[in-house]
Image: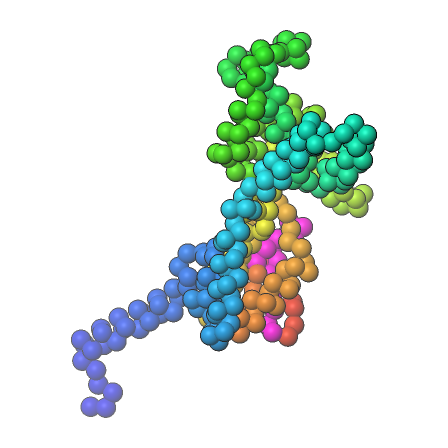
Amino acid sequence: MRGYMNPREFVDSQRKKVEDERAKAKRFPERPQRDVLQFLLDNAPLEEWERDVLAIIRDEAYYFAPQGQTKIMNEGWASFWHSTIMTTRALKDHEIIDYADHHSGTMGTQPGALNPYKLGIELFRDIEDRWNKGRFGKEWDECDDLRVRRSWDKKLGLGRQKIFEVRKHYNDITFIDEFLTAEFAIEQKMFVYGFNEKRNSWEIMDREFRKVKSKLLQKLTNFGQPVIEVVDANDENRGELRLAHKHDGLDLKGDYARETLRNVQSLWRRPVNLVTKVEGKGVMLRYDGQTHTDKKVEL
């Protein structure tokens, strides 16, 4: 009989249909992929020369990653010894003013900006001073008498030894997390800033030490770059690539985001979408190879 299917064949066909639907619905990649360049190398329809160039770019980024993890320490350490050598060994008295004028240009900090040279050198100097005077350990931490703390000097002379130890074992994040103190933040006039929409201006939002330290560590995470992940290589079953920004309180720069989408789309060959937040609201940025668009989305 035409169209006849025995029960076993019917069951097998239904099972296959269910499996096909599951495979179709299964997201690729199964888990978000943070290494976007490697994902493109593995899955984008690249020409051989494109694959070679992209692999070189990725390898170079990973090569320089360790330096990115110690930028504040590197610049601070170089500045510390440059200043020490020039002012105690190399310069004559009449040359000090000229040197200080040039050095101040390197140490200068714009309002709301982070100068790694300045932060690094001052923190190394603070560590050296604290360990010379014994301002560390249980006794120091438990002392709540401000007059005693201001005059505290056990004359241990361990500062130079300590900064060499710190230089050997720490990176920027652990350096800041371990040695940036409330006293240091106050002395250096550190604060959290943000944009006041009502006044249409950038302002100091908070001087509370924990928030200042948290914001600084947040800025150093991932070398200060936004964290972008591949979440779907077949978005809405159309072969489109969907990226997601792990929002940390800072919006993406619009021009950077659009150029990034343009570059990724040129490799993926299909439209690319990026989900993020703009002023606290979910937005999906899209580039289809010709036009940039954006629309509101629920996050």
Where residue 103 appears, x then y in whole percent? 74, 37
- In terms of depth relative to the viewer, which is nearer, 165 or 297? 165
Where residue 124 appears, x then y in whole percent? 61, 29
Residue at the spot 46% in from the left edge and 66% down from the top edge: 41
Residue at the spot 53% in from the left edge and 55% down from the top edge: 61
Residue 8 occupies quadrant? bottom left
In the rendered image, the vertical position of residue 226 relative to residue 143, given as above or below: below
**Range of the magenta residues?**
275-289
Tell me if residue 244 can be seen: yes
Task: Give the total number of marks visible in the rendering.
Answer: 0
Q: Please say whether residue 288 is one of the residues in the magenta stretch.
A: yes
- In terms of depth relative to the viewer, which is nearer, 101 or 293? 101
Instruction: Name the chief secondary structure element in magenta.
Output: strand
Left or right: 231 with respect to 253?
left
In the rendered image, the vertical position of residue 166 relative to residue 226, given as above or below: above
- In terms of depth relative to the viewer, which is nearer, 237 or 45? 45
Residue at the spot 74% in from the left edge and 31% down from the top edge: 91
Q: Please say whether residue 122 is one of the residues in the magenta stretch.
A: no
Residue at the spot 66% in from the left edge and 31% down from the top edge: 85
* Type of colouring: rainbow
- In terms of depth relative to the viewer, which is nearer, 8 or 59? 59
Q: Which quadrant is home to the N terminus? A: bottom left
Where residue 164 appears, x then y in whole percent? 53, 29
Left or right: 19 with respect to 264?
left
Work out which residue is located at the far bottom of the displayed protein and give it. 2
Residue 15 occupies quadrant? bottom left
In the rendered image, the vertical position of residue 134 relative to residue 247, given as above or below: above
Tell me if residue 216 can be seen: no
Left or right: 256 with respect to 56?
right
